[in-house]
Amino acid sequence: MKISSILIMTLAAGALAAADAPKLDGRVQVFAEMYRPAQINVAAGTNDQPKMQTGVGFRFLGELASHPGFYYELGGMLDASSNFTVNNGSTNLTDLKVTDSYWAIGAAYMARFGERLTLGAHLEGRGEYLRIQGEAVTPTASPSPALVDQSTTYLRPWVRGSADYTFAHVGNDVHPYIGVDLAYAITKTYQTRTPDFNNMDNRTLCSLAPKASAALYAGIRF
């Protein structure tokens, strides 16, 4: 999913908004998010789970003039992917890849403790783009291997907690900061049938979406 153009426009708009209200806190950050897609049943008596994934993304946070301490958020994560692992003779999914990316919009409350430490509570809606592609060998695949290339977009809410540390300002009141966050998906779709890799149903594809993630981030406040 190509979201880089959207993110660039988002950050530019945020910077202009911050320029109009210099006393408000604006934040731009880049993050590395780590998670693992969920485990699913891939054949009779066989479960599999793609390997860990790490995606890079961007966020802009802008403080609301009418409610200091409350922020709006815009951002997203670029493509991250990993392969399934099962290869037991009758089933081989090691050439099957799952790719995930998302855009997000949300709100946050950021509590500051002195000039350096900030703790945040975030609620956001994510549009998660999920794609599965490659070759799948299973006992029911016909022809074998099945050639897979399907995708879907999964909309759902997430909650996130963050903690970051701000360093002394650099130049024109620009403050670099680093932090860590943990996120959890409020809703989850569950698989209801063994997938047909020649024509995978959306429910099974959505059930691969991760349940939680952790991220490291760095950015600037202005």
Image (spheres, rainbow, N blue to C red):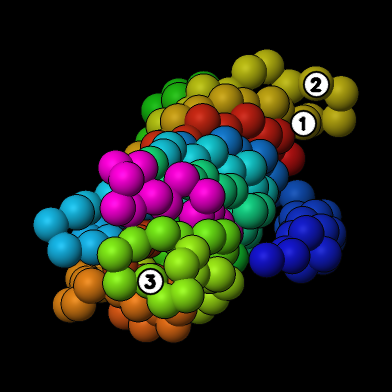
Q: Residue furthest top?
A: 168
Pointer 1: what residue? 174
Pointer 2: what residue? 170
Is residue 64 found inside the magenta-colored segment of the image? Answer: no
Residue 37 horizontal side relative to residue 187, left or right: right
Going from N to C along the chain, the mark reached first, 3 or 2, is 3
Q: CA distance from mark 3 to mark 2?
A: 59 Å
Please name the residue shown 38% across and 71% down the image.
141
Q: Measured from the top left, where is residue 120 in percent x and y? A: 39, 43
Q: Nearer the viewer, residue 171 or 211?
A: 211
Helix, strand or loop at mark 2: loop
Q: Is residue 153 visible?
A: no
Viewer-side label of 1, 3: 3
Query: Which residues make up the magenta segment?
Result: 86-102
Could you tell me how many numbered marks the image carries?
3
Image height of 143 relative to 82, above or below: below
Pointer 3: what residue? 141
Placement of the N terminus among the 4 image quadrants: bottom right
Q: Amino acid at mark 1?
A: Val
